Amino acid sequence: MPEIQLKCENVWKKFGGFEALKGIDMDVKEGEILGLIGPNGAGKSTLLNLINGIYPPTEGKITFRGAEISGRKPHEICRLGISRVFQIPKPFYEMSCVENVITAIVFNSDVDLPDADEKAFKLLEFVGMRYPERRPDEVTLQDKRRVELARALACEPKLLLVDEYMAGLNPSEVGEAVELLRKVNKELGITLMWVEHVMPAIMGLAERVVVLDHGVKIAEGTPEEVVRIKEVIEAYLGTDTAVEA
Ligand SMILES: Nc1ncnc2c1ncn2[C@@H]1O[C@H](COP(=O)(O)OP(=O)(O)O)[C@@H](O)[C@H]1O
Ligand SMILES: [Mg+2]
């Protein structure tokens, strides 16, 4: 049995009177690829925001490799080994792609120039970015996502939180992105907790899936198991054919 890497116990998040997460209990195992699915507004991104310290939980406890991290700041959590790929890439547009990655390395690790420079080019090569010297507004969405991923890898995370990495990519780009995330997991040994709407990608890559709806965990299991659960079909998939879409 793989060890538990991240543990959420009775995690609540309230925004004013609105309960975005209602008592989430879940684990992420060392080395696995965990998919997090559910309808829009289910609380998926909010859960990632609590894990990487953007907000403190209103109640409950989050533990990473045995140490409580709930309420810590994102830069501290990054140093502990949790990094995040945001749904909407927000690079520094006045810098080149490689300068963006260098900046992430210098801020989030103990590596300084000129080693950071070399490391940034290596990371961009690893993610398949062919235009490191271009500015982010001169590259495709797929390449922006690659740069965002390289930035997230800068602090050498043990756990990578990935939010809708496939959104807006065409089917062949989705195939490449699936292979890239697989490579991050298998070659770098990084655990993935991955929010995604593109179901074929989830079905092909996730080893386990957690399903949220209205801030509640409604199911958990292998991808094949969860897509057959009545509550998941009703809340999210709609019909069986949604899985094939
Ligand atoms: N900072 C915030 N302030 C108020 N409401 C928020 C905030 N962040 C998220 N929410 C609300 O919490 C719910 C869950 O949002 P989110 O976690 O982004 O959903 P998902 O990622 O599953 O689509 C939504 O109703 C959203 O409007
Ligand atoms: Mg979201």
Image (cartoon, rainbow, N blue to C red):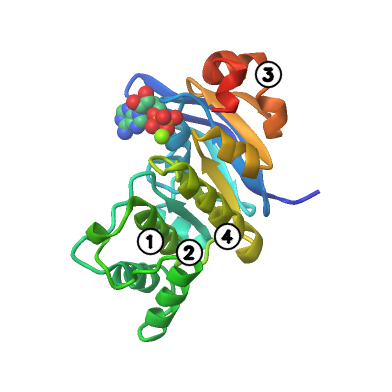
Q: Which mark is residue 127?
A: 2
Residue carrying label 4? 184
Callout 3: SS: loop
The residue type indicated by label 3 comes to: Ile
Q: Which mark is residue 229?
A: 3
Mark 4 and mark 1: span between their CA atoms? 14 Å
Q: Residue at x 69, y 42 (%)?
A: 207
The residue type indicated by label 4 comes to: Val
Split into quadrants, the picture shows ligand 1 in the one at top left
Sequence-wise, the earlier of marks 4 and 1 is 1
Q: Residue 222: x percent and y percent?
A: 71, 34
Q: Is mark 2 within 8 Å of ligand 2?
A: no
Label 4 environment density (alpha carbons within 10 Å; few <14, some 14–19, many ≥20): some
Residue carrying label 1? 147
Q: Residue 65: x percent and y percent?
A: 63, 54
Label 1 environment density (alpha carbons within 10 Å; few <14, some 14–19, many ≥20): many
Q: Residue 114: x percent and y percent?
A: 36, 86
Callout 4: SS: helix
Sequence-wise, the earlier of marks 4 and 3 is 4
Callout 2: SS: loop
Q: Residue at x 52, y 61 (%)?
A: 80
The residue type indicated by label 1 comes to: Val
Q: Residue at x 43, y 63 (%)?
A: 150
Q: Residue 221: x percent and y percent?
A: 70, 31
Mark 4 or 2: the one toward you: 2
Q: Is mark 4 within 8 Å of ligand 2?
A: no
